[in-house]
Image: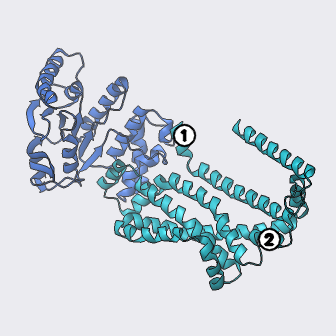
Chain colours: A cyan, B blue
Amino acid sequence: MYRRTSFLVLTFILVIWEISVNFLHIPKFILPAPSLILYTCFSQAPLLLENTLVTAVEILLGLLISLAISIPLAMVMFNFPSIDAAVTPFLVISQAIPIFALAPLLVVWFGYGLLSKIIMATIVIFFPLTVSLHSGFKQVDPDYEVLFDLLDASFWKKMRLLYWPAALPSFFAGLKMAVAVATIGAVLGEWVGAQKGLGYLMIQMNARLRTDMLFAALVWLSVMGMGLWLLVSKLEKHFLFWLNDTKN
Amino acid sequence: MLRVCDISKIYSDLTVFTNISFMVEKGGFAAFLGPSGCGKSTLFRVIAGIEPSNGGHIEWEGLKALNLKENTAMMLQKDLLLPWFDILDNVLIPIKTLKRDLKAGEVKAKRLLSRFGLSGFEHYFPYQISGGMRQRAALVRTLLFDREIFLLDEPLSALDALTRRLLQNEILRIQLEFDKTVLMITHDVMEALMLADKIFLLSHLPMRIIKEIDLSNLPKPRYHLDFELTEMAENIFSTLKGELVNV
């Protein structure tokens, strides 16, 4: 029902857009008509696909690195409250510094290649992942801890049987947020300096007044973001089968 | 024999109980009745070693200790089944955690599940079965701790009256068939009278034992409509009423 409503609203906006552009004779380098954007999306598909893949690889690698950092970090912070207290300010600072300010520096340090963009994506992704996993660990019902304390369970046993599965709902919430914002990091990195990627393509096409290509790149970027989101949602549904059903 | 000698529990701003002492025969069944919030659960947690005591000691079969962590299994009002594991994996948690032989544990678990009417449900998840079945699974898990003393903290209070009656029999089996020493907290006077060999009536905070009722001469199973039990229930209620008014 709501899906249909949002589809109708979108169609309505696109129709108004299309008509206005044609009737007001707006030059296409200022605002291309939706039909033109759609045409470009397909006619330039090979070029767009190539650059989309680059951006996707940057995001996925950033995601993998973030997981490798976030999971151990959240576990350590959870097990040692003193480390939690010591690390948290730095985590917050890492997010308070605008990624825009860091981007040029990272390009200077790590070059125009993939690495600087992967690092950008990592910086954006690892924070929601760490925070959501950590708070997931902390939300475990203390009565469950009593059960495991009676059994003298080791930290790892408790982690495997109790904390990790219990934190998964929160972790997936963080992961969804992470993939949604990850594009920001990667595209920003590409704006500042890159040889490939959707962000790079946008800058190039903007300079050439190929506004239709710029919009087409945005469309592909959105589709890619949506794809990542759906992928995570699928995984979430698969691993959290027990959660949906408890609620029903 | 389980002897609790002069156990105290004091938080910085709250005295829960001081110098509580009592005895329960090995293989016996003791029920603890008292107003809510009187410190019964804390007493159990101290016995189980989840919380330290402030003085006193406990003896189990002549051996002195600060707590009985090694000897006790505990069951709470919440079934505490992990929603992400099926019933079999849930009841196997003690085996996995205590690093016992998993194969042998699985055989034992399946046998126990079937004895408690859960055969065929081994691979169901907790959300797929009823509250009574979940609590029976929790009972099987508690049995698989393989410990001699059972601390049951209101294990049946979340259940409806009918399921409760059925599960009271299961709890009785823990004592009689599996030869465990059972200590149970309950708010249900009749439940205590049906199951226990000994009832301790407790005061409100700071908790002390007001009265000890010996029921060991009454054979089990007992019947709800038994005249003697009904009369005793009235007596217990009037003793506890004073404590309830004070709350």
User: Percent from the top left, x then y, of residue B169?
Assistant: 30, 29
A33 vs A86, nearest the viewer: A33
Q: Which residue is mark 2?
A: A201
**Residue found 14% across the figure and 17% down from its top:** B231
Q: Is residue A105 above or below residue A173?
A: below
Camera-near label (1 vs 2) is 2
Q: To which chain does the residue with label 2 belong? A: A
Which disc number belongs to residue B44? none
**Residue found 46% across the figure and 37% down from its top:** B119
User: Percent from the top left, x then y, of residue A66?
Assistant: 57, 69
Whether residue A246 can be seen here? yes
User: Percent from the top left, x then y, of residue A64?
Assistant: 60, 68
Q: For the C terminus of chain A, give its image quadrant.
A: top right
Q: Are marks 1 and 2 in contact (CB under 8 Å)?
A: no
* Label 1 secondary element: helix
Q: For the N terminus of chain A, give its image quadrant.
A: top right
- Give the distance between the C-alpha atoms of the residues marked 1 and 2, in whole angstroms: 45 Å
User: Percent from the top left, x then y, of residue A227?
Assistant: 71, 56
Q: Which residue is mark 1?
A: A245
Which mark is first along the chain, 2 or 1? 2
Whether residue B60 can be seen here? no
What amino acid is found at the position of numbered circle 1 in the picture? Answer: Asp
**Residue found 18% across the figure and 17% down from its top:** B230
From the viewer's perspective, is A220 left or right of A64?
right
> Residue B228 occupies which quadrant of the picture?
top left
Q: Is residue B121 above or below residue A88?
A: above
Q: Is residue B95 above or below residue B192?
A: below
Q: Is residue B194 above or below residue B142?
A: above
What amino acid is found at the position of numbered circle 2 in the picture? Answer: Leu
**Residue found 41% across the figure and 66% down from its top:** A77
